[in-house]
Amino acid sequence: MTPPETEPVSLLEAKHHLRVDHDEDDDLIRSLIVAAREAAESLTGRQLVTAQWRFVLDRFPGRGSGEGQPIWLAKCPVQRIGGVDYLAIDGQWRAMPPTDYVLHPTREPARLAPAFGTTWPMTLPEQASVVITLTAGYGSPSMVPDGIKSWIKLRLGALYTHREEIAYLAKGRLDPLPFVDRLLDPFRIVTL
């Protein structure tokens, strides 16, 4: 819904890493920073700098089995839930009271579950009948783990130098750099 207001790696940091001391490529470097950040977010399942997201489901999980199974939220870390709206069985959109659900933000992926003693409400059997809005991210760029920032800079360097897929020119051939992506391993969200 709302993208991050800033990037985890600034233009100045990127230019320093790239050893660029002119301004002619600033627009290109800015776009490559965004591309590298989006790749890191995609590979890890994390939101790096605070942004607002909307998740749309066809129904609440576990509804009909008597249990309210948790909803696994696809972006971590989740800071807060902005609201849970659903299309009620009568065809009207309703907002769930915040007291009827609980966010478990320290689990990864974060989970949203019915509060003790409650269940998810019945929804009209329509597509996109549940809408969850949330705020996710580490906060400011200074809160983003250094390992992720290093990966972004390395990806940025490869994109800037080769302007193609990550590769390293060695002895006249292009070789992949799998160790670069390994920097993100501690930050990947694993679902079981």
Image (cartoon, helix red, strand yellow):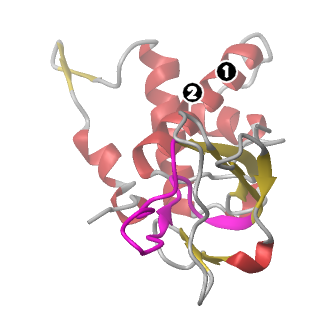
Q: Quadrant of the N terminus?
A: top right
Q: Residue at x 44, y 70 (%)?
A: 69
Residue 60 included in the magenta stretch of the image: yes
Q: Amino acid at mark 1?
A: Ser
Q: Which residues are magenta?
A: 58-80
Residue 170, horizontal then vertical, whole percent: 20, 23
Q: Which residue is mark 2?
A: 35
Which of the two residues, 42 or 27, is positioned nearer the viewer here?
Answer: 42
What is the CA distance from the residue labelled 2 to the residue labelled 1? Answer: 6 Å
Q: Residue at x 46, y 12 (%)?
A: 163
Q: Quadrant of the C terminus?
A: bottom left
- Residue 31's label in the rendered image is 1
- The outermost residue toward the right is 5
Residue 68, horizontal then vertical, whole percent: 48, 72
Q: Residue at x 47, y 47 (%)?
A: 151
Which of the two residues, 17 or 93, is positioned nearer the viewer here?
Answer: 93
**Mark 2 residue element:** helix
Above or below residue 126? Residue 45 is below
Q: Name the side, left or right, on which 59 lies relative to 98.
A: left
Which of the two residues, 184 or 1, is positioned nearer the viewer here?
Answer: 1
Residue 142, horizontal then vertical, whole percent: 74, 62
